Amino acid sequence: MSTDWERRLYLSAHPFAYPLMRGLARLGPVVRVRGVGVVVNEAAIAREVLMDGETFRKDGPGSPGDLWTPVLGPSVLLNMEGEAHRALRRRLSELFTPSYTEALCARVLDEPLARLADRLARGAVADLVDTVRVMAGAVICEVIGLETRSEDDWRRLFQQGERIVSMVTLRTRRLSDSQVEKARSVLGPLGDIAAKAYASGDETTVMGRMRALGLSEAEARGAAGAFFLTGTETVATFVPRLIALLHDAGRLDAALLAPGVLDRVIDEAMRVTTPTPVMLRSVHRPAAIGGVRVGPGDRVVIATHNCCRAYGPFDADASPHPPELRRLWFGAGPHFCIGHPLAMAETRAIARTVLAAAPLKVVRRSPSRRVLIPSYARLMVRKG
Ligand code: HEM
């Protein structure tokens, strides 16, 4: 039997936590685990929790807010709740529209994608891990307003984000003072660049758009930091996994470029990989989750990966996902991923280039070890 590479990536990233998490899925839809929290393994129940932003919040004890507020400031979407959060989301609803994000990716990625296409057409080996990291770095440079066309700059920015994200492990509840200082030393200068782009007010740029949408400089700066931390590694780790899944299923071919097919396959690969394998909430008032009583101070761990894997292994021909599952890997309700159109635009742009170069063979690959988001350390492909 061929290797289940997704399982291997998860095991290599989390050798102890992964078997434990998958084991919990067998214990029922909602399981209380001492020292961890109330774990949710079923998509419909997960969605109910995510939709109820008054009871299950991101700003209490044990929530991600605790983690990122010291670094990003108090008002950066992912640590906000209630009316202030709704108001900021409303103002940002037009920020990442599909047409704007498609245009942004075309503007930034056309050249590096042409280089990749050329490389593959010549029969050379390409490491899709490094290639996609550089491209994700390029997109995030554009988002925060760092003007550069240098691959080294793009790679450096990616690595800086990676260094911050790698401070977090599954057990991290708070960053230490020295970690906060280190993160701030990276985010400070990036915030300054973002603020400059904001001040120039050019509405083709993300920072200029935020100004036009009525955000203050501090809000726009905070949002840029949040995009940088949440929107780089998620995409960069996903795209090589998508390509590997298609390769291993014998489906890495240009037929997937037919209208409507690519998005469906990307959704299916997101379901199987779940780049954000868990979501955390803090309980703010007494409630029940799938029959399990919870109260203020309880921590809810939505095991998105378990919820999504309950629907079986990767299937490139899967019919549309049922409503309870729909895009759960991007969250649901008030905190639904605001960068979703950008993530899809980046993924589509890169996948189209790779698929157009098919048939391709994976000639070598290896998993990353002890990382937060399971990923390939390298994925070498060549025409063939
Ligand atoms: C494959 C790529 C991505 C995945 C799987 C992903 C996943 C998610 C998930 C699951 C959430 C909700 C978390 C929760 O409710 O606890 C979220 C929120 C968020 N994402 Fe993404 N994301 C991706 C790409 C991006 C990109 C490209 C950006 C921005 C440029 C971004 C920015 C954000 C922000 C700012 C939030 C917080 C929104 C809020 O709390 O209101 N993400 N993402």
Image (cartoon, rainbow, N blue to C red):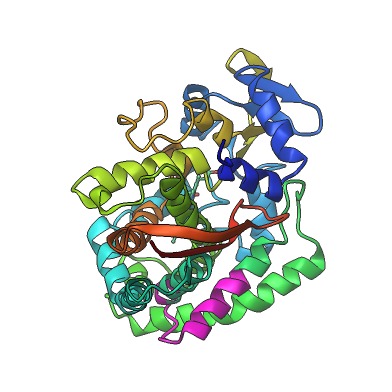
In the image, residue 261 lies in the stretch drawn in magenta: no
The structure residue drawn at horizontal position 32% and vertical position 53%, both measured from the top left corner, is 93
Residue 384 % position (x, y) = 38, 61
Q: Of 314 and 290, which appears nearest the observer?
A: 314
Give the prevailing secondary structure in the magenta stretch: helix
Report the magenta residues as a range.
142-161
The image quadrant of residue 120 is bottom left
Residue 283 visible in the snapshot = no
Q: Is residue 367 above or below residue 213?
A: above
Residue 368 % position (x, y) = 66, 58
The structure residue drawn at horizontal position 67% and vertical position 16%, both measured from the top left corner, is 293
Residue 54 visible in the snapshot = yes
Q: Is residue 192 above or below residue 293?
A: below
Quadrant including the N terminus: top right
Is residue 209 found left or right of 308 in the rendered image? left
The structure residue drawn at horizontal position 30% and vertical position 46%, both measured from the top left corner, is 263
Residue 64 % position (x, y) = 64, 48
Name the residue at the left extreme. Answer: 259
Residue 57 % position (x, y) = 58, 38
